[in-house]
Amino acid sequence: MKSNPKPRGELEILLIVLGVLCLGLGAALAVQQPVLLLGVLLLAAAAGVLLALWGGGLRSAIARYLSGDVFEGSSVQFSLAGLPNPVLLLGGKTVLWYNDAFRQALLDDEDYVLQPVSRVLPGLELHSACQPGGQSLECKGCRWWVFSSPSDKDRSLAVVHLVDVTDVSAQAAEYRASRPVYMLFQVDGSDVLLENLRESERARLLEGVNLLLEHYIGRTTGFLRRVASTRYVAVVEERHLTEMIAGKFDILDKMRALDENVGLTLSIGVGHGGTLAECQQMARQSLDMALGRGGDQAAVKTENGFEFYGGVSRSIEKHSKVRSRMVAAALVDAIRRSDSVLIMGHRMSDLDSVGAALGVLRVCHICDVPAAIAIRKNATLADSLIHRFEEAGLEESFIDPDLASEAVTPDTLLVVVDTCLVHMVESRELYEQCARVAVIDHHRRAMGAIPNAAVWYQEPYASSACELVSELLQYAGEKGDKPTPLEAEALLAGIMLDTRNFALHTGVRTFEAAAWLRRMGARTEEVKQLFSTSLEEYAAKASLVENAEVYLGCAISVAGELPPQAQVAVPQAANDLLTIDGVEASFVAVEKNGGVNISARSMGAVNVQVILETLGGGGHLTMAGAQLKGVNQDEARRRIQDAVRAFRQEQAEKARSSAAQTE
């Protein structure tokens, strides 16, 4: 027979304590009055008999008496005993009564009256059970919804009702696991990567893609259909999406390994949680987001936005300029339908932001529409460029955002350059005032992107916003319309800044844009002077480099707030740290306005954009930034190190997985 030892309850402990006290008092009286010794002995014997009876079944008898059929006339018995659901009556945390359904379902026909409720229902929280939704509790291999109603007469009493929802919970879990998930697959840049291959090689690669996707979806209960030469649709169940997320969409790695010489990559858009039509729409939005971030990744639409997986490859450069010509026509049309145009970059604007804004300003002049650049001159890294335009008598080209907001009309067009994020624009108030917005950006799309832009031109393969604007200028206006040499130098400066003098993130179109700007009169020696720094800036940069520490192959430098005139030292220090042997990426963080601003750079082996996205930032594979609000230097350093460590661990996991697949 299985033993069932029961610890002493509160009542037993109280009786024992009282008994010991009585015996002690009796002993003291016996010493003072020996005549009373016989009475004390009789009292002790009676107490012993009572305890023996209690432990030998008296309590069980009382329990059966309380929960049995002897209370047929009581209100408790009449209202609760006959219920088919288990019911429990508590006095504080002690079990006072329960019905037969409770004993059979949860007590194995044993009695637990006057026992602690924690022995009967482990995990019960009365304050949760009193809520309208009750408490979900697992006990005796079943799932229960527990509801509690305190007594009105005595707040120490509580009636607990239990509802068995085991089958319903299992059915609900199965329903959620079988919900449809709509997936879109697209091979990135296939027209560019496959155009120079022979038909047999192209057929071999496409067949490899087909087999890869068929095997990936074939492991599920869903189906796959090809809707274009390099575009596929799949519908799977929610349970299989959970497995794909757990595996971090390993098909992305398999696609890159399909042919390393060609370098095919895959973009995936996922929609789930609604009807099939809603899932399809979410999948399209997810795929657009994945492509806007450069491809080679999966984007999953969630209630809180998007979740991203992958994104470790460089964006594929497009050789065709058809889209540039189409966007230029759309931008010119939007400008001509406006009574005024305002151009705005990101906060702490740099040469790329201001140079691209000046290029768009030239497009507005070609269209003969009044325009100005909204910029805060006291918070910019391109003051040398602005000063050069002011010396040329073009100070009216720049306007403070607060003054610009006074001139906004319903027909004003706002052109945002070098960023697509609402929280990164120079003036959010000005953005919210303008009903019509156009976006020109070269960064990967991230959460918080500007919605419903009239013109959207985002190409992550481009080196800079100035490169994109330079191409647009070539298709804006008539053949004789061209930028001035000063504007061409501003655009060339932006390209040189983001490519680090054409050393990184450059493509064929980057050099074509630079060559066109040179033909427009840009002088490289004048552009070089825009990068000159003061002695104070140089000293600040040297201090940031000197204080850097190397952590897992990444140089991390954290410092206090710099003077406004030395802010340009932050990205310069990040660039200089990459010249140190063994440093694959650099992170320079400085305090600013109660938070910490981070500037990150890499040579390509470390994806700083993925790292800083975990800190709320974004950017490119080789250039990114982030702003941490309400943190100090130590906290910022810790967060950067945690993000770098997580990235390195993920790299190691992928390397091990790749090695295992090779074996």
Image (cartoon, rainbow, N blue to C red):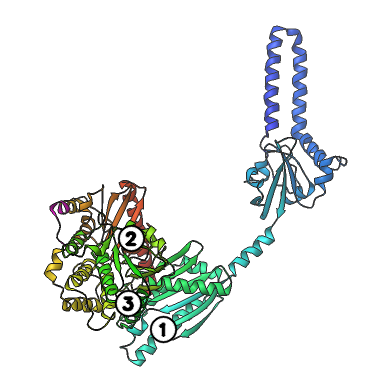
Q: Which residue is at the front of the view, 242 or 629?
A: 629
- What is the number of the mark on residue 256? none
Q: Residues within 10 Å of mark 1 (few under 14, many from 20)?
A: some
Residue at left 80%, top 50%? 83
Q: Is residue 266 left or right of residue 69?
A: left
Q: Which residue is mark 2?
A: 404
Q: Residue furthest right?
A: 73
Residue in the picture at 25% in, 76% down:
507
Disc 3 residue type (three-letter): Ile
Discs 2/1, front = 2
Which is more foreground, mark 2 or mark 3? 2
Element type at mark 1: helix
Q: How far apart, in angstroms, are the residues tagged by discs 2 and 1? A: 56 Å
Q: Nearer the viewer, mark 3 or mark 1?
A: 3
Q: Give the Cα distance between marks 3 and 1.
A: 20 Å
Comes first in the chain, label 2 or label 1: 1
Find numbered disc 3 in the image and state the secondary structure of the residue it sits on: loop
Is residue 385 found left or right of 318 in the rendered image? Answer: left
- Residue beneath disc 1: 208
Asked whether residue 534 is drawn in magenta, I would say yes
Which of the marked residues, 3 or 1, is nearer the chain's N terminus?
A: 1
- Residue stretch rendered in magenta on the structure: 531-538
Residue occupied by mark 3: 316
Q: Is residue 196 above or below residue 461?
A: below
Q: How many marks?
A: 3
Query: What x and y, as percent, mark residue 192?
Result: 33, 83
Looking at the image, is 614 positioned above or below residue 20?
A: below
Q: In this rendering, is residue 514 above or below 405?
A: below
